[in-house]
């Protein structure tokens, strides 16, 4: 019998080897062919992109028709041809009607160019003469090809094409459409500055300059997006921030390869360390004071033109549970509010799971009178505690999402009234118990105490995992799931900084601004995990 089995196993091994010898070369061949096709496509597509790049020649009769052809037949693009100087040199002004400041162009730019000024004797001196003596514009650039000219046109700048000039002048005549500065919509405070970022990058960087008030604040610009380039500002304090961190941020942003980046949330998803975790590794905020405080700790801020939300990196989980108001109040109230926030985060995550585990598995842990009261309230409920909790939790999440999408005047009303009506109707119909409504209400209220919206979403998703673990294993399942989440957080990093810092790795010096908030006179050093150039804040 043993020989029979060994013989058949040997036969199967021979058959398997034959199949592998026939399949693997074919697979390697197909893989090579696929890679060759990809490389062929990339190599063939490169000249196509180079063909679309038109370099200006300095000949007006050739550059203007080519420029009009590339811009297409768009009614909102204005091409104004005229003659400049005493020699009547041909010129053209190209702009987008609704984006450029036509009043400034008509009042200052065109009269200066169309005046009868003396032209230089040498043709090579014409661009320098126009730049230094004629154009009354503070910001003046040059574009040698069409690709460098178009991003400025779409922002409201005007292009000046002059016969004999090899480059096109780019005039800063932007008439930007923006809203005024207002209060933060997503981060309400009782005490603190009442100003927030808006969609204008110029306004946002001006706010940082106003708050920073130091020449060491560095703001570096770069572009993201191939089809619709947008300006990204990277802000950091050169005397404090680690150079390796700044370089890492710039490299990750440079690797973004997309046609369009409409919001800073796109950048956040591209530059984070772990794309599979629920927890945000980049902090977003509308508040300039929060960004300025982060810069003073050695962190880096990222601002995108067209987005009112700035990004802060690196981030730890303690930052997501902190608020600027913690530092504007005295240390004792600030500490108590912060501790309440941590308790609310635990209730928001574990509240329904603990209820399910006690009701289903550990009734002996409940006081007798309370157990009798819960049993009486659950009499006639046809569903187990897990289904009961899922019905209420899903209903609350739907109401929360609906309240966000509805117009503001009726959104809060619908959320409150809808929650009361659905909860009362569910209890009257015997679908859920009154104690379940109380547990879900406390959980929902606790989730609102988390200041960072993205962190609140992560805890709301984890809540459902703890509920299923409690329904299967009881309190042991809740503890195991909690330890699993803690182990995941211990391995998670944000730009090389441990996510649980200063808890793991343990740094006693940084605990002055962790769960408890020490008096400001005690917080003399910056976070040790940041490895900044100047560890001391003062003294």
Image (spheres, rainbow, N blue to C red):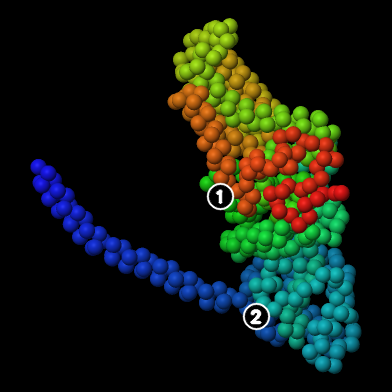
Residue 253 image point, x, y percent: 63, 60
The residue at which mark 1 appears reads as: 274
Foreground residue among 62 and 242: 242
Which of the two discs, 1 and 2, labels the residue nearer the N terminus? 2
Residue 59 image point, x, y percent: 70, 86
Q: Is there a contact, CB below 8 Å, between mark 1 and mark 2?
A: no
Q: Residue 176, located in which quarter of the rendered image?
A: bottom right
Image-based side of 60 in relation to 227, left or right: right
Element type at marker 2? loop
Image-based side of 41 in relation to 335, left or right: left
Res. 440 mark: none
Count neighbours of disc 2 (C-alpha within 10 A) and say few if under 14, some if 14 to 19, many if 20 or more.
Answer: some
Q: What's the residue at 60%, 65% (across, down)?
A: 226
Q: What's the residue at 60%, 48% (across, down)?
A: 493
Residue 533: tell me if it is visible: yes
| C-alpha separation, residue under disc 1 versus residue under disc 2 | 42 Å
Counting labels gives 2
Residue 442 image point, x, y percent: 64, 23
Residue 327 lies, with reference to residue 151, above or below; the image says above
Foreground residue among 406 and 486: 486
Foreground label between 1 and 2:
1
Q: What's the residue at 63%, 22% (across, down)?
A: 441
Count neighbours of disc 1 (C-alpha within 10 A) and say few if under 14, some if 14 to 19, many if 20 or more.
Answer: some
Residue 246 image point, x, y percent: 69, 59
Foreground residue among 24 and 339: 339
Q: Quadrant of the N terminus?
A: top left
Residue 203: tell me if it is visible: no
Foreground residue among 335 and 42: 335
Q: What's the residue at 69%, 27% (across, down)?
A: 413
Element type at marker 1? loop
The residue at which mark 2 appears reads as: 55
């Amino acid at each position: 019998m043993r020989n029979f089995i060994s013989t058949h196993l040997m036969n199967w091994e021979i058959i398997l080897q034959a199949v592998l010898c026939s399949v693997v070369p074919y697979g390697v061949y197909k893989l090579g062919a696929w890679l060759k096709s990809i490389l062929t496509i990339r190599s063939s597509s490169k000249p196509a992109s180079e063909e679309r790049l038109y370099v200006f020649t300095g000949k007006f009769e050739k550059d203007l028709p080519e420029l009009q052809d590339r811009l297409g037949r768009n009614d909102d693009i204005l091409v104004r041809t005229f003659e400049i100087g005493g020699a009547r040199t041909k010129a053209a002004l190209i702009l987008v009607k609704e984006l450029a400041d036509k009043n400034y162009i008509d009042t200052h730019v065109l009269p200066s160019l169309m005046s009868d000024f003396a032209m230089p004797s040498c043709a090579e001196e014409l661009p320098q003469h126009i730049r230094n003596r004629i154009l009354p514009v503070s910001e003046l650039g040059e574009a040698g090809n069409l690709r460098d000219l178009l991003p400025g046109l779409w922002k409201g700048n005007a292009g000046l094409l002059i016969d004999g000039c090899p480059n096109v002048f780019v005039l800063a005549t932007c008439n930007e459409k923006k809203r005024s500065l207002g209060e933060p919509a997503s981060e309400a405070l009782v005490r603190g500055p009442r100003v927030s970022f808006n969609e204008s990058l110029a306004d946002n960087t001006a706010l940082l300059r106003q708050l920073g008030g130091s020449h060491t604040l560095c703001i570096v610009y770069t572009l993201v997006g191939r089809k619709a380039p947008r300006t990204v500002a990277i802000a950091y304090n050169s005397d404090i921030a680690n150079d390796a961190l700044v370089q890492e941020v710039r490299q990750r942003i440079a690797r973004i390869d997309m046609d369009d980046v409409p919001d800073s949330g796109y950048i956040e998803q591209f530059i984070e360390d772990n794309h599979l975790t629920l927890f945000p590794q980049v902090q977003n905020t509308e508040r300039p004071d929060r960004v300025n405080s982060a810069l003073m700790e050695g962190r880096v801020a990222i601002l995108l033109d067209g987005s009112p939300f700035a990004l802060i990196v690196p981030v730890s989980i303690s930052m997501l549970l902190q608020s600027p108001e913690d530092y504007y109040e005295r240390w004792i109230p600030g500490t108590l509010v912060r501790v309440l926030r941590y308790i609310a985060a635990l209730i928001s995550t574990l509240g329904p799971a603990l209820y399910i585990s006690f009701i289903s598995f550990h009734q002996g842990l409940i006081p007798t009178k309370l157990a009798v009261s819960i049993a009486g309230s659950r009499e006639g409920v046809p569903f187990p505690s897990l289904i009961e909790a899922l019905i209420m939790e899903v209903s609350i999440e739907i109401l929360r999402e609906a309240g966000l999408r509805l117009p503001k005047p009726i959104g809060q009303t619908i959320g409150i009234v809808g929650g009361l009506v659905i909860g009362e109707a569910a209890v009257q119909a015997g679908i859920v118990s009154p104690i379940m409504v109380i547990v879900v209400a406390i959980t929902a209220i606790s989730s609102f105490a988390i200041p960072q919206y993205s962190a609140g979403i992560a805890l709301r998703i984890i809540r459902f995992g703890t509920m299923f673990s409690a329904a299967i294993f009881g309190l042991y399942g809740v503890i195991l799931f909690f330890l699993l989440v803690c182990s995941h957080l211990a391995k998670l990093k944000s730009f090389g900084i441990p996510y649980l810092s200063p808890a793991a790795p343990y740094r006693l010096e940084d605990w002055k601004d962790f769960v408890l908030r020490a008096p400001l006179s005690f917080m003399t050093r910056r976070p040790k995990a940041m490895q900044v150039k100047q560890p001391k804040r003062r003294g």
